Amino acid sequence: MKKEESRFVQSNIFEGMVSIRAIINAIDNNISDRRITKVYVAEDKVKKRLKELSYIKARSYDLGYTVETVGTEIFEEMTIGNTHGGLLCECTDRTIPELGIESVKDKGFYVMLDGIEDPYNFGYAIRSLYAAGVDGIILTPRNWMSAAGVVCRASAGASETIPMFMCDGLDAVRCFKEKSYSVICSDIKNSVSAYQTELKLPIFLIVGGEKRGIGSDLLNECDKIVRLDYKSDFGMALSAASAASILAFEIMRQNL
């Protein structure tokens, strides 16, 4: 199978030290029940990765995984990307809990991403959302966490260290409204500029994919529909990852 096709395959192979550290941090902070089962090191990178290997081996004793050095060709066959630095790990699945009102902060910021067509874009969006201080990601049944290793690398580890919950869109809206959240959808029709409306916490933001957008059932339930105004005459939509990033930082700015 070609490497570019492998990104869409379910996989719990995580590449690179950033991903490995993110998984360990998530374990340490009780964010995820994912566990590392084995770390692989490419033999031609051992001398260059002595510091990282010292940490990896030290943590293996309390986390219960093994460390194995493998030939470079074998290692390359196991990877998808080229920025792994000679390190990867095999992991168990991560349980994504169902969203419940008890798991929602009183004055938080949560985001639902729906309809992103690529695991890399999904990861890029999560990276920005994490940087903007989002408290959690709400996943619909159709999401890219099956390709967790790809998402983790694209998100610079943020996908493993941010809380995630599974929920249908309408049920999520009802849950957040019960906690007195404003439900904000990103769309064009009947919208107001995100830069000219109040976006104060607590907020539940829903961003749809650029192809399908947000369903009318969700739009009918939201409190505000916001859009991103362009300076150039541009008749196309931004990618969902870009739109989510810009909106998240605008919300962050308004709540500093």
Image (cartoon, rainbow, N blue to C red):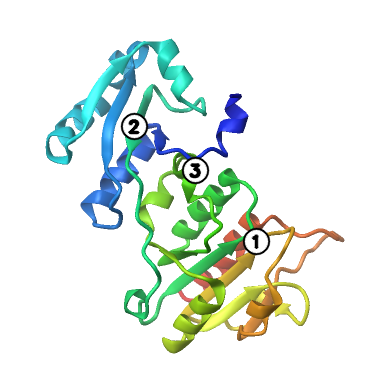
| The C terminus sits in image quarter | bottom left
Q: Earlier in the sequence, mark 2 or mark 1?
A: 2
Is 234 located above or below residue 196 in the figure? above
Instruction: For label 2, count other residues whose C-alpha is less than 10 Å away and answer few (under 14), some (14-19) or many (20+).
Output: many
- Which amino acid type is marked by label 2? Cys
Q: Nearer the viewer, residue 8 or 69?
A: 8
Give the residue displayed 27% in from the left and 38% down from the top.
36
Alpha carbon of mark 2 to alpha carbon of mark 1: how far?
A: 32 Å
Q: In this figure, which residue is indicated by the disc labeled 3?
A: 147
Q: In this figure, which residue is indicated by the disc labeled 1?
A: 243
* Left-right relation of 110 to 233: left
- Which amino acid type is marked by label 1? Ala
Res 89 label: 2
Instruction: For label 1, count other residues whose C-alpha is less than 10 Å away and answer few (under 14), some (14-19) or many (20+).
Output: some
| The N terminus sits in image quarter | top right
Secondary structure of the residue carrying tag 1 is helix
Give the residue displayed 41% in from the left and 75% down from the top.
108
Q: How many numbered circles does the render carry?
A: 3
Whole-percent x and y of residue 10?
A: 49, 40
Alpha carbon of mark 1 to alpha carbon of mark 3: how far?
A: 22 Å
Q: Nearer the viewer, residue 41 or 145?
A: 145
Q: Quadrant of residue 189?
A: bottom right
Instruction: For label 3, count other residues whose C-alpha is less than 10 Å away and answer few (under 14), some (14-19) or many (20+).
Output: many
